[in-house]
Amino acid sequence: MVFGARSIDDRWSCLHKTETTSFKMGSSLSVLTTTPRMQLLVFVAGKTQLIMNTTHELQSIDFVRSVGEGNTDKHEPEETNVCSLTLGPGSMLDGSTVASRFLHVELELNIHLRRLSFSEPVHYIYNPLEYAWEPHRCFVERYCRGGQNILFLGMNPGPFGMAQTGVPFGEVNHVRDWLKVTGEVGHPPSEHPKRLIKGLACIQSEVSGARFWGFFRKLCGEPDIFFRHFFVHNLCPLMFMGTTGKNLTPPELVIGERKALLALCDTALCQAVATLGITMVIGIGRVAEQRARRAFSAAGMEVRVEGLMHPSPRNPLANKGWEVVAKAKMEELGILSLLNINP
């Protein structure tokens, strides 16, 4: 199974169906990849940029995929992927904020992930950083502010959490009602009938996410209290499933494919941590903790790594009282006071 485009070296060309040709974003414009109705990643004056849909100053442009390195005059009709992009004010991520730089790291990871292919037992791959980009971007721009030095690190999306909302541990009720995240959610290219994407309208609750965000909601009261010092991120943005729709974790992948995937994710993690100025990473679950240690060691980065029991309902110890365990861990690490309402 090939994930994403055939080749990351594919180029895209702009074809205008109308006379509206005022699309000029810089002296150099080359389109690298696009997701229908969601995003357009381009190089403008040597910088990676993301142009998002808006509802203002409508300006529709059609994009058709061109195949081949440096060859923009050969098109494969059967591979054509056309999308309509609407531009408006404030739609450019220019790297001027911590949030935009963090999003750039994720977009670059998306590009590299599209090169990968996966074999049995993988039959379905969801990347919410593509089809759920709008709520993900809303989450990052609202809460990734800079000055946060502690990162909670999960492994990868769950079917009723981030896969639906684009938010790590993103149980729908907490994402919508507490974090106040909004945005349209699309669909992955191929959906398993038992794992349909319904976005913020999903009625099934993810237990891990409800426990995670519910714990901090009780402690902090308001999201702003939590995000003064903390941020949340997943090492890998991809969710894998087999033929039955059973969730497959990265350790269950073929070893060579797993190594290629995690090497890319490790690099992106180091970039994200450097971008945010993180000094402590708390891995949620043993695998996330171990990957963080390995990534920082290989990169020569001095980042403190700790671990916290995963709140998964598959974990009998978590079912006996994950909140008690989590609170004790926060106190042991000396960070419980950072979660209080008073600074």
Image: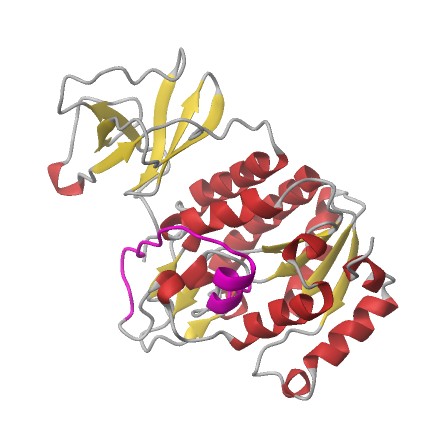
- The residue under the point 28% across, 64% down is 191
Q: Is residue 148 magenta?
A: no
Q: Position of residue 314 (x, y in %)?
A: 56, 83
Numbered range of the magenta stretch: 169-192
- The quadrant in which the N terminus is found is bottom left
Q: Quadrant of residue 240?
A: bottom left
Q: Position of residue 280 (x, y in %)?
A: 78, 53
Q: Position of residue 137 (x, y in %)?
A: 48, 45
Apparent side of residue 168 relative to residue 187 in the rendered image (left or right) = right
Q: Is residue 171 magenta?
A: yes
Apparent side of residue 54 relative to residue 84 in the rendered image (left or right) = right
Question: Where is 236 relative to 254, above or below?
Answer: above
- The residue under the point 74% across, 46% down is 278
Q: Position of residue 328 (x, y in %)?
A: 82, 74
Residue 119 visible to the viewer: no
Question: Where is 201 relative to 113, above or below?
Answer: below
Main SS, magenta residues: loop
Residue 126 visible to the viewer: yes
**How many numbered dots are placed on residues in this image?**
0
Rendered image coloring scheme: secondary structure
Apparent side of residue 241 relative to residue 317 in the rendered image (left or right) = left
Question: Where is 55 relative to 343, above or below?
Answer: above
- The residue under the point 56% across, 62% down is 178
- The residue under the point 68% across, 64% down is 221
Q: Nearer the viewer, residue 234 or 326?
A: 326
Apparent side of residue 124 relative to residue 312 in the rendered image (left or right) = left
